Amino acid sequence: YLKAREIQRENTAPYIPEQNSRVERDNRTIIECT
């Protein structure tokens, strides 16, 4: 499923905002598109 949609899985440490910046950016992009 992920490969078919060109989605890369990335593991990060929980509760560390510095590592979650990529996710935050992606989520903001998704929200802005809706």
Image (cartoon, grey):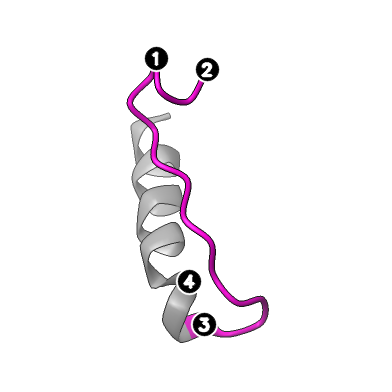
**Eye-nearest disc, 3 or 1:** 1
Q: Which residue is mark 1?
A: 4
**Eye-nearest disc, 3 or 2:** 2
18 or 9: nearer the eye? 9
* Numbered badge on residue 1: 2
Q: Residue 16 location in percent, x, y?
A: 57, 85
Q: CA distance from mark 3 to mark 2?
A: 27 Å
Mark positioned earlier in the residue sequence (3 or 1): 1
Secondary structure category for the residue under label 3: helix
Q: CA distance from mark 1 to mark 4?
A: 24 Å
Q: Amino acid at mark 4?
A: Asn
Quarter of the image that includes the C terminus: top left
Secondary structure category for the residue under label 2: loop
**Eye-nearest disc, 4 or 2:** 2
Mark positioned earlier in the residue sequence (1 or 4): 1
Secondary structure category for the residue under label 1: loop
Q: Which residue is mark 4?
A: 20
Q: Residue at x 39, y 33 (%)?
A: 7
Q: Amino acid at mark 3?
A: Pro
Specify the quadrant of the image occupied by residue 5. Answer: top left
Q: Are marks 1 and 2 in contact (CB under 8 Å)?
A: yes
Q: Residues within 10 Å of mark 4 (few under 14, many from 20)?
A: some
* Numbered badge on residue 17: 3
Q: CA distance from mark 4 to mark 2?
A: 23 Å
Magenta-span inclusion, residue 10: yes
Secondary structure category for the residue under label 4: helix
Q: Residue at x 52, y 82 (%)?
A: 17
Q: Residue 15 location in percent, x, y?
A: 66, 82
Which region of the structure is painted magenta?
Answer: 1-17
* Numbered badge on residue 13: none
Mark positioned earlier in the residue sequence (4 or 2): 2
| 25 on left or right of 11 | left
